[in-house]
Image: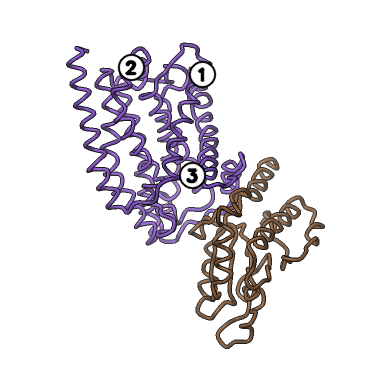
Amino acid sequence: MLLGLGKILIFPGFLFLTVYSLLFEYLDRKVYARLQNRMGPPWYQPLADFLKLIGKEVIIPAEANKTMFQVLPVISLSAVAAAFIYVPVLGKEAIASFEGDLIVVLYFLTIPTMCLFLAGWYSRGVYATVGSVRTLTQLFAYEVPLFMALLAPALIAKTWSVTGMTAFFAEHPLYILINIPALFVALVAAQGKLERVPFDTPEAETEIVAGPLVEYSGRLLAIFRITIDCELVMIASLVSAIFLPFMTGNIALDFVLYLVKTVAVLLFLALMRSVMARLRIEQMVNFCWKYLAPIAILQIVINLLVRGWLGL
Amino acid sequence: MSLIKKAIDWGTRKSPWIIHFNAGSCNGCDIEIVDALTPRFDLERLGILQRGTPRHADILVCTGAVSLQTKDRLKQIYDQMPEPKFVIATGTCACSGGVFDGCYCVLGGIDRVIPVDVYIPGCAVRPEAIISAVVKLLGALEAQQKGGGKDAERRSDYSTVGREIQSFEG
């Protein structure tokens, strides 16, 4: 009981998630800066930003719904932290798992996006409303390809649990090669989920200032920022658990492998962010439904055929 | 408790986010501010980010002699920023009105409307001067936080602190 609580709260649970997410934000910004031929921020920058925002005044607009305005950041952070429980960090075993937790994780990951939408909506600002409507529009575009891309490997593994899928693919590493299109779809859709370039239309700072977060300040903004960082860690962990489950069997070595895999996913996402420009919202929706969704459907068909052919 | 306050003070010094406002400038200083934000000067080394919204910003970087049209907007933008907040008057016009001083349509200087922490003269200011001003503002802030205040006298070429920087106790 106490051990389980410690796992959930400290390692590899909430505390590890927040510390690792600050490190992730640093790596992301550093790689982005190096690709622009800059030095980039020092290693403590995300921590300094977080502490500064904690100390700042919180302004709640007179028009805004005060309860929702304050509660939404906390709900979104707790949803991401809850999702992290079902993703394996130490070896093959997650803190908790049951048949079907992949679906639960995906729904937990939708909650921050919905919170972002509601945060913008309840702020009652013009920019915030435009940003939150775009957030919701974008949600309908990337969510289906992302779900299909993450569910396709489950057809081969014949289990709906993240831990089960990791265990299956660790035993049969060659099946990963079949899932490469799904990996591509998942990484591109993840950029949309995390609202990063090229899909950062909802918070496009050059046109609608900061999107749904326009009215947020102080520690509420700090919680939202750390939620977005945690989401980045979460997506990288999920992708590396499902698509890159190379295991050695030794727990310490597996943890190092976990760090290497997640950082590799992050480097790819940072590279995508640096070399691309922002799409307009309708271009984004077109791209997701015209290219990403068909590739994901094709992946599901391929996986079904492979499953029948191999008699899994 | 004091450890938390120390950590927050440290964070405030290490992560100044700026917002840029043009209060009737000729655009010369604005272009230099944009210049200072380019990869050549790489302000992210110091933790400086440009934010679009005053709610996220710590430092208001103003240019121009404050025309009557922008007076209310400037006040509004300043009021929307959360405490602690600082103001940098960028360019000769922002400091004193410059060549527009005495003109019927300008107030002549940012400090006629809002309190200013750092003045940077120059027409137009150089990016190095802007960076130096921000660093000096942060240095003065550190002296203030540590309770000293003796370093607040140490000003040179580019910047002068117009008022005592408000402490965080308030």
Q: Residues within 10 Å of mark 1 (few under 14, many from 20)?
A: few
Q: Mark 3 or mark 2, which is nearer the start of the sequence?
A: 2
Q: Chain of mark 1?
A: A
Q: Which chain is brown?
A: B
Residue at the spot 76% in from the left edge and 53% down from the top edge: B143
Q: Name the residue tied to disc 2.
A: A174
Confirm whether residue A133 shows in the render: no
**In front of the other: A274 or B25:** A274
Q: Which mark is residue A225?
A: 3
Of A219 and B48, nearer the camera is B48
Q: Which residue, as the protein is rendered here, is positioned at the far bottom?
A: B104
For the residues marked 2 and 3, what is the alpha-carbon distance in whole angstroms?
38 Å
Q: Residue B78, image x and y in percent?
A: 56, 66
Quadrant in which residue B18 is drawn: bottom right
In the rendered image of the structure, the colour used to display chain A is purple
Report whether residue B101 is seen.
yes
Front of the two marks 2 and 3: 2
Q: Quadrant of residue B109?
A: bottom right
Q: Chain of mark 2?
A: A
Q: Quadrant of the C terminus of chain A?
A: top left
